[in-house]
Amino acid sequence: MDDTTPSNEAGAAGAAEPETLAVAVPYQEFKAGLPVGRFRLIVNPERAYKYVRHRLYLNGISIPLLGTGVALGLTGYLIPGTIFCVLGFGMRWFVKKEAPKILLHLIQNDAKVYYESIEFEIMEVRLAQD
């Protein structure tokens, strides 16, 4: 192989090992094998946040909280307004920070979320290495 040949065209040296490839697992098998440690999950945090935000209707809850907080603050009720604003921003911050964990919880309880997260490339399932 010369210097002009890309490394992915080098043949077997550029091929991925079977343990590092994503596998297609039916939901029932996944649900039974995850607590035992048969699978390893790779979650994209950005996409997980977007999906969880959509799935939990986060915008529909936090935006009215923020609006109510601002309205209360403008009418003279500063402490309740501040509390509502902190709740609105805090909810978004918490969900962004914990999105992969929330997604895992949703996946364990709903097959639709499992298949959607794989389809939208939010997560991939790999076999655990022994």
Image (cartoon, rainbow, N blue to C red):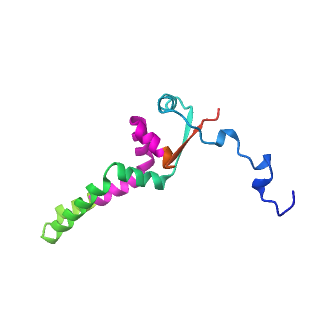
Question: On the rendered image, what quadrant is the N terminus found in?
Answer: bottom right
| Number of marks in picture | 0
Q: Quadrant of residue 101?
A: top left
Residue at the (12%, 70%) spot, across then down:
75
Depth check, front residue: 39 or 75: 39
- State left or right for residue 118 relative to residue 55: right
Start-end of magenta stretch: 88-117
The picture places residue 107, in percent across and down from the top left corner, at 43, 39
The picture places residue 26, in percent across and down from the top left corner, at 51, 32
- State left or right for residue 121 relative to residue 79: right
Image position of 83 with respect to 104: above or below: below
The picture places residue 123, in percent across and down from the top left corner, at 51, 46
Image position of 98 with respect to 70: above or below: above
Residue at the (48%, 53%) spot, across then down:
45
Residue at the (39%, 35%) spot, across then down:
109
Residue at the (45%, 51%) spot, across then down:
48
> Residue 56 magenta-drawn?
no
- State left or right for residue 88 relative to residue 117: left
Question: On the rendered image, what quadrant is the C terminus found in?
Answer: top right
Q: Quadrant of residue 61?
A: bottom left
Depth check, front residue: 107 or 93: 107
Image position of 27 with respect to 46: above or below: above
Q: Main SS type for the magenta part?
A: helix
The picture places residue 40, in percent across and down from the top left corner, at 56, 39
